[in-house]
Image (cartoon, helix red, strand yellow):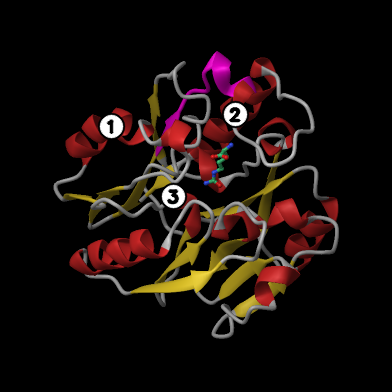
Amino acid sequence: YHFNSVIVREPSHSVVNGLRADDRGNPTYEGVKAEHDAYIAAMRDAGVEVTVLPALEAFPDSIFVEDPALVFPEGAILLRPGALSRVGETAEITPTLRDMFETVLDLPSPGFADGGDVLTTPKSVMIGLSARTDKVGAEALSACIAKLGRKAEIVATPEGVLHFKTDCSLLDDESVLSTARLARSGVFKDFKQIIIPEGEEPAANALRVNDVVMVGSDFPRTIEMLDKLGYKVVPLKTTQIGKIDAGLSCMSLRW
Ligand code: CIR
C-alpha cells in the first residue's frame, strides 16, 4: 500500500451505460466526474503522482482502469477482461504501460482475468475466481506473477459477488477489511480481519494509499470503526460509481 504512482482514466459520457448486475438507475456523467475528480485530488493529497488518461467513449467502463492490467514496481501484466464489452480496454492502456514499465507481460489466451480480482498483500498476490476471472486465466496469471518474482495464490470469490476485491481491501501489512461473507470462506486466516458492519458491504472496497484509507462516504459505521482502530480515513463519495458496481480500488492502477 506504499505507492508513488497511479494511473487513472477520465470517465466518458458513455459511463452512464456502464455494466451492472442489478439496475438501480443510471449514474449521471456529472456525478461520476465529480467523484472521479475528488478521487484524483485525494490521491495527490496522499502523495502519489497521478497520470490522467483521456476518456474513451467507446468503452463505458474504461474509467475502471484497475481491470485491464495489473501493475507492480517490478513490471506490468496486460490482462484479458472477462466482460466482452471491456476486452478492448487492454489495447487502449498498453502504450501507456509500455512507456512507464520496462517489463510488460501479456496474459496469454484463452483465459480471462480482471484486475479487480487481484489483491496484492505482503504474503502473496491473491487471485479470486469469479465470473470475470476463470481458472485458466487465474493459472496463467499466477505464472506471469511468478515471472515478476512474486508468489500468487488462487482463491474463491463468494457467489454473486462481481470481483474478489468488491468484498475486501488491504489495510496494512497484516490486516484486511472484509465482508463477513468473504471472511467466512477462510481466505484471510493468516490476517487480522476487520469485518464490515452488516448492511455496509460495498464499503469493503476501500483503498489504503500510503498514510490514509479511502472509504466510501455512504458508509458511516465502517468509517467510525476504522477511525476508532486508528486509521486515517479519507471519506470519498462513491454513490454514482456504486450504481455500476464499482468502488474505490477500481479507478486506479497503483505502484
Ligand atoms: C464492470 O462491471 O466491469 C464495471 N461496471 C465495474 C468494474 C469495477 N471494477 C473493479 O471492481 N475493479
For the image, the number of numbered tags is 3
**Marker disc for residue 48:** none
Q: Is residue 44 visible?
A: yes
**Does ligand 1 reach within 8 Å of label 2's beta carbon?**
yes
Q: Position of residue 119 (x, y in %)?
A: 47, 62
Please name the residue that numbered disc 1 is placed on.
91
Check if mark 2's residue and mark 3's residue have beta carbons within 8 Å.
Answer: no
Q: Quadrant of residue 48?
A: top left
Picture quadrant of ligand 1: top right
The secondary element bearing badge 2 is classed as loop
Q: Earlier in the sequence, mark 2 or mark 1?
A: 2
23 horizontally vs 60: left or right = right
Q: Is residue 212 visible?
A: no
Q: Tell me which segment is drawn in magenta.
A: 7-16
253 and 81: which one is in front? 81
190 horizontally vs 198: left or right = left
Please name the residue that numbered disc 2 is placed on.
18
Q: CA distance from mark 2 to mark 3?
A: 16 Å
**Does ligand 1 reach within 8 Å of label 3's beta carbon?**
yes
Q: Amino acid at mark 2?
A: Gly
Q: CA distance from mark 2 to mark 1?
A: 19 Å
